[in-house]
Amino acid sequence: MESQPNRIHYNRPQLLARAIDAKDERDVWGRGTGKSQGRLSMRALDMAQQMPRCSFVNVANTYMQLLDRTLPPMLTHWQELGMQRDVDFWVRKFPDKNFGLKMPYIMPETPEHCVFIRANKTDVSVMRLVSQDRPASSSGLSVDGIIGDEARYLNHQKLEDELIPTNRGNERYFKGSHLHHSTCYTSDMPNTPESKWLIEEEKKMDVEGVELVRLIQLKLSKIHSKAFGRGGKYTTSEQSKIKSFEKSLYEIRKDLLYYSEASSLENIHILGEDFIRRMRKQLSPAEFNRAILNIRPTTVEDGFYPYLSERHFYVSIDNSFVDSLIESAYGKGKLTDCRKDADLQHSIPLSVAPDFGGSFNCLTVGQRWGRDFRILKNFYVKNPERVKHLAIDFDKYYKHFYKKEVVFYFDHTHYQTNPVSEKVPKDELISELEARGWRVRPRYIGETPSPFTRHHLWNFGLVGDDDNILRPLFNKYNTEELRNSMQNTQMKRGGRDPWAKNKALERDMKVDQLEAPHLGDAADILYFGANLDAMEHHNVAPDIYVLGRAS
């Protein structure tokens, strides 16, 4: 390595995780704490260098996540350490044969889904990029370890059934390394029942073993500090102690799981106070508590959508488009239009439905797929942004959608004016879309369906056992705010209507309106309208305005 490394700062959670260095590691840290850049990047280097010519996996729920969010900070950190691209690591291509390096024991046939890492002067290890949205991407592998970021998005059952069994073999090469067949997952705080497995891992931690490693590391640090004061010279007694301590560390670490939690405040000296203030303004209180303060979320009781669960959320990314991009296109926030979505039918219109308010306006987007109705995306703007900005955001995201046409569902409440617009918001949104080249087909569904009707319509659809009701599905990554809204919407206790939503948050201007039911209300109109059209198309004539009364 010819270039000189920069002076690198590591925060307390990063330093402690590196010091413990357990075979299995689970780090649940807030946003901006350096999960990829300061932890996974170092874990990958440790594995590559401690097990020269090894093969390990970097796993994600989607391949786009790997390229756009996980890899860039890892590569940046390696360069900060003084490593050079195409000299010390090679991204999605083989090392130059002129280096004369020894390649991994289990060599991939093609380099497209690999990062090769120089282990030393003569050997190279490989980090294979595996994602759960690419069927069979882990089939046939035999690897020496697994790492992964954004682990709360991983399908745990798939992980156990498909990838964990590949973490096997090669004992003759690496049986002396405690990192052989290791696992290291990082994530911000899980917020769904299906992702709680990550938190449950804490129960597997040997607290005494972790504390023992910490104490041994403290003793080793004191020995090295004394030797440093003597110009790097160690006494015979110190050398013997070091050897004994390192042997003990190996024995403890090789069967140890380490679990840690940390808030973003642990990295405030790097992030800055302005970042925390900005996040507090931009995020809802619940999301701020989860993503920044790393507080475990609570489950809402008496939910309006009680059957909504992980099985209703799908991942659909056009990997051919992602693969076609050059590496400079990767990076947080750059893949943000509909070209990445593989769940679009470009030959039929998009269905949309809004919810308008004085300080919060939102839009939900969907399409029918046979018996399914897919909710593809949600949009929202907060005061001082207006309805116009909602149209701008929609048009920007769907500018590559071939059929510039939308079916616009609305009910009687959308004829009302509100403080954010000089016009009726519905008319303003339609005119703004038309001004941007969209053909809008208004679809009036009549009076707002009763809470009873909406509640039971969703219940029948989510359970999926009524052939007359469309089954709702949600694009997992495009509807995170909608999911949060729906999963946190409660029934109103003690009211005249036992099925009514609790709308108290909508009247509390101190509350971030992302916490209120607005997005769920927009999805109600969208889903109801889609079912209304489906029933009319098939000449099915149940009165869905009183759906479920018999039950």
Image (cartoon, rainbow, N blue to C red):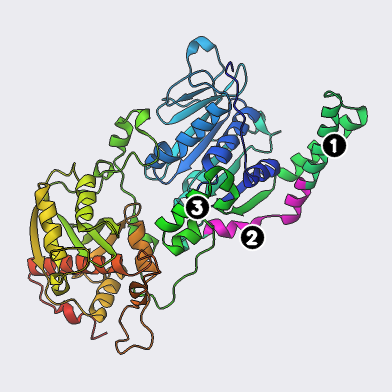
Give the structural element (helix, strand or loop) at label 1.
Answer: helix
- Percent across and percent down for residue 316 are 31, 48
* Type of the residue with mark 2: Lys
- Looking at the image, is mark 3 or mark 2 earlier in the sequence? 2
Q: Main secondary structure of the magenta part?
A: helix
To which residue does mark 1 refer?
244
Q: Residues within 10 Å of mark 3 (few under 14, many from 20)?
A: some
Q: Quadrant of the N terminus?
A: top right
Q: Quadrant of residue 431?
A: bottom left
Of tags 3 and 2, the one toward the viewer is 3
Q: Residues within 10 Å of mark 2 (few under 14, many from 20)?
A: few
Q: Is residue 101 above or below residue 258?
A: above
- Percent across and percent down for residue 263 are 57, 54
- Percent across and percent down for residue 349 are 12, 53
* Type of the residue with mark 1: Ser
To which residue does mark 3 refer?
276
Q: Is residue 465 above or below residue 433?
A: below
Which span is picked out in magenta? 197-214
Say whether residue 136 is left or right of residue 378. Answer: right
Say whether residue 365 is left or right of residue 474. Answer: left
- Looking at the image, is mark 1 or mark 3 earlier in the sequence? 1
* Type of the residue with mark 3: Ile
What is the CA distance from the residue labelled 3 to the residue labelled 2? 31 Å
Say whether residue 301 is left or right of residue 415. Answer: right
Point 76% across, 55% down: residue: 208
- Percent across and percent down for residue 367 are 19, 56
For the residues labelled 1 and 2, say whether their Cβ atoms are less than 8 Å apart. Answer: no
Point 47% across, 70% down: residue: 299
Q: Is residue 205 above or below residue 399?
A: below
To which residue does mark 2 refer?
203
Of all residues shown, which one is farthest toward the top?
Answer: 98
- The answer to if 208 sits in the magenta stretch is yes
